[in-house]
Image (cartoon, helix red, strand yellow):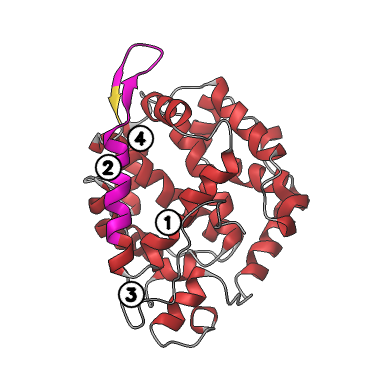
Amino acid sequence: MLLNPENGAAIDFTQPAGEGALLPPESISWRIFKNPIALLIGGIAAVILELAEPSVRTAVWQHSSFARNPMRRLQRTGLAAMVTVYGARSISEPMIARIGKIHARVEGNTPCGLSYHANDPRLLTWVQATASFGFAQAYSRYVRPLAGKEFDALYREGALASTLYGATEAPLSSAELNALFANMRGRLQASAIVFEFLQIMRSTAGFPKPLCWMRGMLVRAAVDLLPDWIREHLGLTDRHGLGHAERRIVELAGALSDRVVLAESPAVQSCMRLGLPKNYLFV
């Protein structure tokens, strides 16, 4: 399973019965995060953007299992995202606190000698912003186009979780996100690690079996989400993105996955926890 890392803690999203999450089920976040295609593509796009920032890149590559076991890292990150959005507050809030304690131990220096600390609000804000950007853009591009007010609503909905994670200046609207991206122009750097990450994702055996045949397309779909100036800055040319026929295949997969009700998915289980129909988010 995409969200079931080996030896990881099992999360029962059906419990405790009746307990609410950080966000209500009628939120746009609940509808977007139910889609596995959007989560995969958006997550990959977010990591590319994270690796473009030197301090985040060094922290991720030196203090995590990404280079050795990228899918396990993505699974853990994906599960954390699911718990943050869907999990009961008695589960999500302690989990976020534990992640904060882990970040508190991560510090060092970039190859250029710049010191960093993983709990730096500036770095946490970039990580939270890139995740929100990736998931929102992936859903809008490959599942269902989002209106401007829906993008803004999604960013506002993430405010509480962002604050709990320590990202105190996370964007609350598309305008604020665009301003943050513009301010990052002088800080983002090209790196061979970005291309190493893309190669790892194209070749990893850890993709969910139903999606293994299109993993290259999903990686290229993620590259296509990036703003043109960032792609150019990182050296990601047209050949790193999707062809026209491939884009249509990804769109079909995204639309189809938005209609499939899987009883074991966090979204469906969380609806059950709150006494809602299993298909509540699919109608």
Left-right relation of 97 to 276: left
x, y (%) of residue 141?
57, 57
Assign a secondary structure to mark 3.
Answer: loop
The reply to whether the C-beta atoms of the residues labelled 1 and 3 are less than 8 Å apart is: no
- Tell me how far mark 3 sits from mark 2, CA to CA: 27 Å
Region of the chain picked out in magenta, as a range: 93-115
Q: Which mark is residue 81?
A: 1
Which amino acid lies under the numbered mark 2 shown in the image of this protein? Lys
Assign a secondary structure to mark 4.
Answer: helix
Which amino acid lies under the numbered mark 3 shown in the image of this protein? Pro
Assign a secondary structure to mark 1.
Answer: helix
- Tell me how far mark 4 sits from mark 3, CA to CA: 32 Å
- Tell me how far mark 2 sits from mark 1, CA to CA: 17 Å
Assign a secondary structure to mark 2.
Answer: helix
Q: Nearer the viewer, residue 63 or 58?
A: 63
First in residue order: circle 2 vs circle 1:
1
Left-right relation of 255 to 184: right
* Residue identified by numbered label 4: 182
The residue at 49%/39% (across/down) is 47
Q: Nearer the viewer, residue 136 or 108?
A: 108
* Residue identified by numbered label 2: 101
Q: Nearer the viewer, mark 4 or mark 3?
A: 3
Which amino acid lies under the numbered mark 4 shown in the image of this protein? Ala
* Residue identified by numbered label 3: 24
x, y (%) of residue 192?
57, 21
User: Few, some or many C-alpha atoms within 10 Å of disc 2 (few <14, some 14-19, many ≥20)?
Assistant: few
